[in-house]
Amino acid sequence: MFNPIYKKMLLDLISSSILCEPAGVRFIINDTHSVDTSLDNAIQFIAFGDGGGLPHPPYVTDIQRATAQEMARVAQKFGVDFVLNVGDNFYFHGVTSVNDCRFKETFENVFKAPSLVDIPWYILAGNHDHLGNVSAQIAYSGISKRWNFPHLYYELTFRIPNTNVSVTIMMIDTVVICGNTYEKNQPIGPEDPHLAQEQLQWIQKKLASSRADYLIVAGHYPVWSIGHHGPTPCLVDQLRPLLKTYNVTAYISGHDHSLQFIREDDGPAYIVSGSGSIVDKSTAHKKDIPESWLQFYNADISALGGFTLIQIIPEQMLISYRQPYDTVVFQTVLPRRKFYIK
């Protein structure tokens, strides 16, 4: 969501320069788990969202450029397998058709390094994408070899090389479930309750039957967040119980333009990675979750944009929060899943 204040912030970015750490500096918070750069048997991917740029020239923000450059460096260094894009791909009103110049100006010309071009991107839609032609974004899958957006919601399955360890990622459409925001802080309810219920039934069926060693759900709206938008009540009520019941490893989202790691005492981890184009340091909803759940938030450090690198090995899932200029701001690990047995 973008309110008028956000719009002004984005427009100001056109002429602004980024204040950054000197190249090569690594600012690490809570570095309790070092990430091994020489992983052979692993699935590695970048998760980020809200990289939708600007609706007019130059169609991109300085933060987006810097984030894209760091994504490219990390993808090359670690041998990343794919990118997971959790929505708000084009600000402020999505695209109009598959021929919309925004595909070129905000996506192809920005994330252009070979390390990002030669791997798949798995896409889902955010609230701003739904203000435009989401069908055109799905259709763009037939034009771009890396843009993979087969349906509003879909399932990805992987197996860690040379092992029997499986990873499932469920890409869901939280705007269909909860509705759009229309300049409000929270979604106002589904446009089509039947389609919302149909997707929730699909989610429950897939989760209930999954025997994946790592089970991840990705959507645009966060379940929990301490940022400007805060928790999404619709998802707290309807999605969170499913994530807990079926022992989901992690839920990845964007929407709030920040980096957060939240973990319930007896439930999944919640990864917010929405700093693709702009950073918002708001902690307006910090009191909406128990203090012990919040393990990281980037409100008190240099706001350079950023993303998460997720590396899944047989024994554990390693998560590192990264910002431009080789900056690692938080790292943690999640255990292999004990899947639900009915």
Image (cartoon, grey):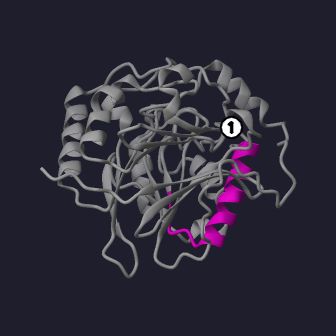
Q: Which residue is at the far left? A: 342
Q: Residue at x 38, y 45 (%)?
A: 135
Determine the image quadrant of residue 113.
bottom right
Q: Secondary structure at mark 1?
A: loop
Residue in the picture at 27% in, 34% down: 241
Rendering coords of residue 144 (x, y %): 49, 63
In front of the other: 131 or 184: 184
Q: Which residue is mark 1?
A: 56
Give the magenta part as a residue range: 60-83
Pinpoint residue 274: horizontal percent, then vertical percent: 57, 40
- Specify the quadrant of the image occupied by residue 117: bottom right
Q: Residues within 10 Å of mark 1 (few under 14, many from 20)?
A: few
Decide whether residue 68 is among the magenta residues.
yes
Percent across and percent down for residue 200 are 23, 38
Q: Is residue 339 magenta?
A: no
Q: Is residue 10 above or below residue 334?
A: above
Q: In percent of the image, x 40 and y 51: which residue is there?
A: 138
Residue 239 can be seen in this image: no
Q: Is residue 284 visible?
A: yes
**Against 165, is 226 above or below?**
above
Horizontal side of 37 relative to 141 (left or right) equals right
> Is residue 280 found left or right of 229 in the rendered image?
right
Give amino acid for label 1: His
Image spot of residue 339 (x, y percent): 25, 55
Who's the residue at 44% across and 34% down the image? 221
- Secondary structure mostly seen in the magenta stretch: helix
Judge by depth and name the residue closer to the eye, 242 or 31: 31
**Residue 247 vs residue 323: left or right?**
left
Q: How many marks?
A: 1
Name the residue furthest right. 22
